[in-house]
Image (cartoon, helix red, strand yellow):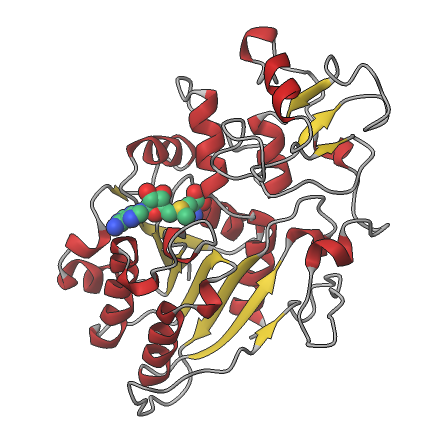
Amino acid sequence: MALRVAEFYSGIGGMHFALQTAGVACQVVRAFDINTVANEVYRHNFGGVAVMQRSIESMPMSMYEALRADLWTMSPPCQPYTRQGLQRGSEDERAKSFLFLVDLLQRLQSKPTYLLVENVAGFERSDTRTVLLRQLVRSGYRFEEFLLNPLQLCIPNSRTRYYLLAKRDAAPQECPDDRQFPADFRHTVPGAGMIEPPADDAGRVDFERGIWHHDEVRQVKHYLEEQPPAPAGWPRLPQKILDRHSYVHDVVTPEDRRTCCFTKSYTHYAEGTGSVLQTHGTVGVDPMVRENTRYFTPREVANLMGFPAAFSFPGGTSTKQQYRLLGNSLSVSVVAVLVDYLLHRM
Ligand SMILES: C[S@@+](CC[C@H](N)C(=O)[O-])C[C@H]1O[C@@H](n2cnc3c(N)ncnc32)[C@H](O)[C@@H]1O
């Protein structure tokens, strides 16, 4: 029987694509997101799925009860936990809907058997994580937490993220409100053949330093579009931007085995929002750098994030919107590995 899935914070459907990539027989019974542009993209790719365009916390419990979902996927807003933000955690308004879902778990009759949570690195230090884990213990879930990066799957893109997998096959336990949880994170998924990141003496891993130049990581050229888009649709890197910011751009070539994390501000801010591509010549040496350096196209970013060839944006989605939505989404490749582990091996 097909697994019934509730896809919370569905965005452009990264979780749904990961379920497909993992070959899971499933039915997404409802997708939830408040972003109208993201929902248009979701419907364009998954026409048959009912998308709920209302804030999650505004819906009555009866609606969630009626879903009878076996799996909840959740990639809540990351702003409460990012280094750039104020790190207000559960105090942040944007954490409210996730805390609502965590609370709902305890009260629902038809609890999901499986949970999958994705968030930025930093979430693992938040009070929201602690609230979540206490609730899982009380509601009979066994869980495992991960910090993973697509580089470990030999994909030349860095995107370190926190993931939690939970399965409801334990006895519910008392859990006092002051219980804390150790930082017990896995850095590979058992059986997935991931590259093990090296750790320092304190046990901290640095994915980028450890895997940036790993020979097994594929070259960027395998993720590039064969036919460059027509000039009108080309995400240009204007001369004045290169002149002003060339020292902060992360420039890579097709032969490289790495790109930085593409964020929702890609092309908007130069620093730390994603790599730019020097199509030929040697980085730092070639005097033609201004003529031969460009942004990665949205399709190329999607390729690096593991979106399948069938994924597309509806006509009318601006290039800027495409970058924003992709930057907010997730590594389909990493989540597919986690889904497989959660459903079949955990
Ligand atoms: C990190 S993004 C998730 C992206 C998604 N996983 C994807 O693949 O595109 C968080 C999403 O949560 C949505 N969101 C934020 N607050 C919400 C709320 N209260 N109810 C429903 N959706 C919400 C945002 O619109 C955004 O699309």
Q: Is residue 212 above or below residue 301?
A: below
Is residue 32 something one can see in this rendering? no
Is residue 134 shown left or right of residue 272?
left
Q: Nearer the viewer, residue 28 or 86?
A: 86
Residue 177 spot, x, y in % from top left: 28, 85
Q: Nearer the viewer, residue 92 or 213?
A: 92
Q: Quadrant of residue 335?
A: bottom right
Is residue 312 something one can see in this rendering? yes
**Residue in the image at 83% along x and 51% along y:** 216
**Residue in the image at 45% along x and 49% along y:** 84
Residue 146 spot, x, y in % from top left: 56, 68
Q: Quadrant of residue 223?
A: top right
Q: Quadrant of the N terminus?
A: bottom left
Q: Nearer the viewer, residue 31 or 25?
A: 31
Residue 114 spot, x, y in % from top left: 41, 69
Is residue 29 shown left or right of residue 210?
left
Residue 140 spot, x, y in % from top left: 36, 83
**Residue in the image at 31% along x and 84% along y:** 138
Is residue 279 shown left or right of residue 261?
right
Q: Is residue 131 above or below residue 47?
A: below
Q: Quadrant of the C terminus?
A: bottom right
Q: Is residue 160 above or below residue 292?
A: below
Tell me how many marks there are: 0
Q: Quadrant of residue 52?
A: top left
Q: Is residue 56 above or below residue 256?
A: below
Is residue 117 shown left or right of residue 253?
left
